[in-house]
Amino acid sequence: MSYAIQAEGLVKRYGNMVALDGVDLEVPVGKVIGVLGPNGAGKTTTVRILATLMRPDGGRATVGGYDVMKDPVRVRGLIGLTGQYASVDESLSGRENLVLLGRLLDMSKRNAKARAVELLERFELVDAADRPISTFSGGMRRRLDLAASLVGRPQVLYLDEPTTGLDPHARNEVWEVVRRLVADGTTVLLTTQYLEEADQLADRITVFDHGRVVAEGKPGELKRRVGGQTLQVRPTLASDLDEVGRILAELTGAAPARDLNTGLLTVPVADPMLVSALVRRLDGAGVAVDELGLRLPSLDEVFLALTGRPAEESKRNTQQNPIAERNVA
Amino acid sequence: MTTTTIAPAVISGTQPSPLRIGPAKAVRHGLALAGRGIVKIGKSPAQLIDVILTPIVFLLMFVYLFGGAIAGGDVAGYLQTITPGIMVMTVFQASIGIGVSLNADASTGVFDRFRSMPIARSAPLVGAVLADLVRYVVCLAVLLTLATVMGYRVQTNPAAALAAIALLIAFGMSFSWISVYVGMLMKTPGSVQGLMTVLVIPLTFASNVFVPSQTMPGWLRVWSDINPVSLMSDALRGLLNGGEVAGPLFGSLVWMAGVVVVFFPLAMRAYRRNAA
Ligand SMILES: Nc1ncnc2c1ncn2[C@@H]1O[C@H](COP(=O)(O)OP(=O)(O)OP(=O)(O)O)[C@@H](O)[C@H]1O
Ligand SMILES: [Mg+2]
């Protein structure tokens, strides 16, 4: 397997403060890695080192096989960067920004203009192309930022919190763009505080906390590592709660947790085959349920289990993954 | 993995020597970024207000307010002497603005983007210095127009006058590297402005722009005679009004070269640090 990015033992200090404390990272060519972590975990610092904007105090990193410290110019020729904060020139128009970047990448005037038009079309910015960027919405700015980092057709793209502050619609647009880039073979390193985002886009997730990697794996693996599955049942009638609770306790040998607000009973299960047994028992007892499902722990719970505190800013992931029947009986 | 276009270096086992940006490319990148700077000035011409007002204020103030006292009534003759000096002084003033604006610029994501691209490291700074050409031209156009209205006349020939202007612009660009350095060093635009103002005063006022060095006490005279503003003013007087050129011109060129040799690398180093 060949790696687009390899980092070993990256250390970065700001004075006494240790921002990175030995970070290892490996990203295979053509994959998306999600770097997940709360504020101050060291995500931006890692991206800046890999983008040659900053030298680490320890460790080494290569991008496309080139050492970020020894051969930064070659690394820069491979990468595109969309930083956490806007990285386009506010006083120029979108088109002017893109043409300038093309010129800096040694395109002819004609090619730079053509590339700008191509990107403006792709990011649906044609109508706003010649307007000052100060009139852009947050989503438009982010799209222009992305377009700007793609002018040189980078093989490795860094996206530092690309959707922070965007509404769900704009966020979906950015996700779509990332998916298309990956389909074209681009390697993407994406940092995010949104668990849902990493889950949606990333092939692998690396969880950072306090400058260290605290977990690494496929989204599903991480979820499994944190704990087993949970069985959830919501009886249609609140009066059936006791009866269903008894059945669950009998089947699993553990007392289910009850949420009186939602009328949901939750119990950990070791054997997924219990679901069919449960359905038969409920049938036999004549109890109707609104919801019945097995779910893996959400990434929020993964985060809590790995770092000892909840992921900041992430909205509670209320969506479940019902892998058994819903609305039975 | 199937097809990969990257990771060529690891396969051979030997790393190629690091890629460097050649001087020709560096110049091209610098010019592209200078173009950006000029477009930006065109979009908000209010940035030019200082280089429009400074020459007007200086010329009117020194000629009409102090001219009588300093020159003993020969205002026309004083205008002839002082105009080249005020040209130097205003261009010098104009050249310190760059540190302030670069200080604000360099902390934005735009400069991060430049730094993450395969372009010459110096290009954003060189581009900004070159874009200041517009400011110098505006400054000198305003100054020379007003001086002409007030009665100033070039005594030599157009070729010498053009040479004078080109020399002066090169002078401004050379000395602006001090401001670029300070701009990369300081935390805020305000502190850049403050430090540069303090630095500029002994250079502009302790010079022969307004009064001849001969009238000064010994120690000040020594400084005034080697002050780059004095030397440049003398060179311009020679080129515009007639008189000796070679000596002061040589002195000015030595200063310009010295400032660039010292402050360009310092500015570049501070710029690199600034990123980390
Ligand atoms: N220039 C700096 N000077 C001092 N400390 C810094 C600097 N930049 C970052 N830090 C510190 O280093 C740590 C890691 O910062 P970093 O920006 O990499 O975190 P992050 O994961 O990107 O956080 P966020 O989600 O807030 O963007 C933080 O504690 C931060 O305060
Ligand atoms: Mg960050």
Image (cartoon, coloured by chain):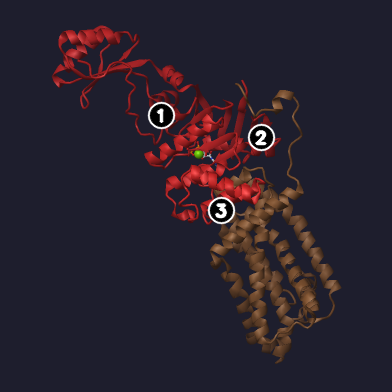
Label 3 packing within 10 angstroms: few (<14), some (14-19), many (20+): some
Secondary element at image label 2 = loop
Colour assigned to chain B in the rendering is brown
Secondary element at image label 3 = helix
Quadrant of the frame with the N terminus of chain B: top right
Q: Nearer the viewer, residue B184 or A178?
A: A178
| Residue B258 appears in the figure | yes
Q: Of the residues under marks 2 and 1, which one precedes in the sequence? A: 2
Which residue matches tag 1? A309
Q: Chain of mark 1?
A: A
Q: Tell me which residue sits at (25%, 13%) in the image.
A: A255
Disc 1, ligand 1: is the CB inside 8 Å? no
Asked whether, in this view, residue B29 is left or right of residue A306, the answer is right
Disc 2 versus disc 3: distance between alpha carbons?
A: 30 Å
Disc 2 versus disc 1: distance between alpha carbons?
A: 33 Å
Q: Tell me which residue sits at (74%, 74%) in the image.
A: B207
Which residue matches tag 2? A68
Q: Which chain is red?
A: A
Disc 1 versus disc 3: distance between alpha carbons?
A: 45 Å
Q: Nearer the viewer, residue A20 or B47?
A: B47
Q: Nearer the viewer, mark 2 or mark 3?
A: 3
Q: Is residue A242 above or below residue B229?
A: above
Secondary element at image label 1 = loop
Q: Position of residue B48 (x, y in %)?
A: 58, 68
Which residue matches tag 3? A96
Query: Could you tell me the amino acid type at mark 3?
Result: Glu
Query: Could you tell me the amino acid type at mark 1?
Result: Arg
Q: Nearer the viewer, mark 2 or mark 1?
A: 2
